[in-house]
Image: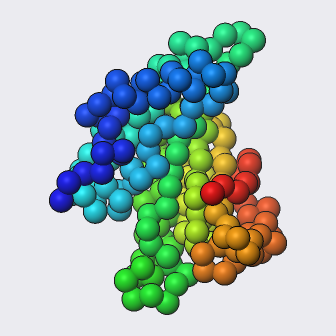
Amino acid sequence: LKPRKVEIATVTKPQVIREIHEGFLKAGVDCLETDTFGSNRLKLGEYGIADKIVEVNTAAVKLARELADKYSTPGHPRFVVGSMGPTGMLPASEDPDLGRITVDELEAIYYEQACIMIDAGVDALLVETSQDILEMRAAVFGCHKARTGKKSRVGLMAQTTLDTTGRMLLGTDITSVLATFSRLPIDVIGMNC
């Protein structure tokens, strides 16, 4: 198995990620997203590098933090947002392979990644490109548990992905997403893709 080049790039080719981040900063962005979209234990495990979860996430946050601080001014602060993508599992699905994970297992996966990113210095956590309402909920709870346990004031954002009919992959519509997440400890809820 070969590691995905995107997630490991902050470790193997930090200059490439540095150049991408600096391009965004020079264009005037307020926030840098870390190069950690697929850097949870489950996704890294697909490439035989689950043991590198701390190294990969810490390197990505520290690089983004260094650059955000470098480009920050009193009138234009820059922030680091820890990107947390889907695990590839769909717990709301009846698929025998994709549905073979519990909500508690998912919460633990997101909790672990969130703890690492909080320790490394993110300003906010972003659960993004969520396609399964149960995974998204578990991710939110895992992130909230991490920031509560670490007594951290980092922000928490969650973004669902909708198809052209306005539904998540398994059919949940935006009204149900908003009803489910409006009372959860999320600072920002949005959509992407």
- From the top left corner, tell me how far across and down residue 11 is, in percent: 29, 34
For the residue pair 30 and 126, the one nearer the viewer reads as 30
Split into 4 quadrants, where in the image is the N terminus?
Answer: bottom left
- From the top left corner, tell me how far across and down residue 163 is, in percent: 66, 70
Q: Residue at x 45, y 82 (%)?
A: 99
Split into 4 quadrants, where in the image is the C terminus?
Answer: bottom right
- Looking at the image, residue 190 sits to the left or right of residue 59; the answer is right
For the residue pair 106 and 192, the one nearer the viewer reads as 192
Quarter of the image holding residue 46?
A: bottom left
Q: Residue at x 58, y 14 (%)?
A: 71
- From the top left corner, tell me how far across and down residue 152 is, in percent: 59, 37
Tell me the colour scheme of the image.
Answer: rainbow
Name above or below for residue 37 compared with residue 168. above
- Looking at the image, residue 131 sits to the left or right of residue 42; the answer is right
Q: Residue furthest front?
A: 164
Residue 120 visible (yes or no): no
Residue 2 visible (yes or no): yes
- Looking at the image, residue 189 sits to the left or right of residue 136; the answer is right
Name above or below for residue 8 compared with residue 45. above
For the residue pair 127 and 129, the one nearer the viewer reads as 129
Report how many numbered discs are placed on residues in the image.
0
Q: Residue at x 44, y 64 (%)?
A: 87
Q: Residue furthest top?
A: 74
- From the top left corner, tell me how far across and down residue 104 is, in percent: 48, 71
Q: Residue at x 73, y 75 (%)?
A: 165
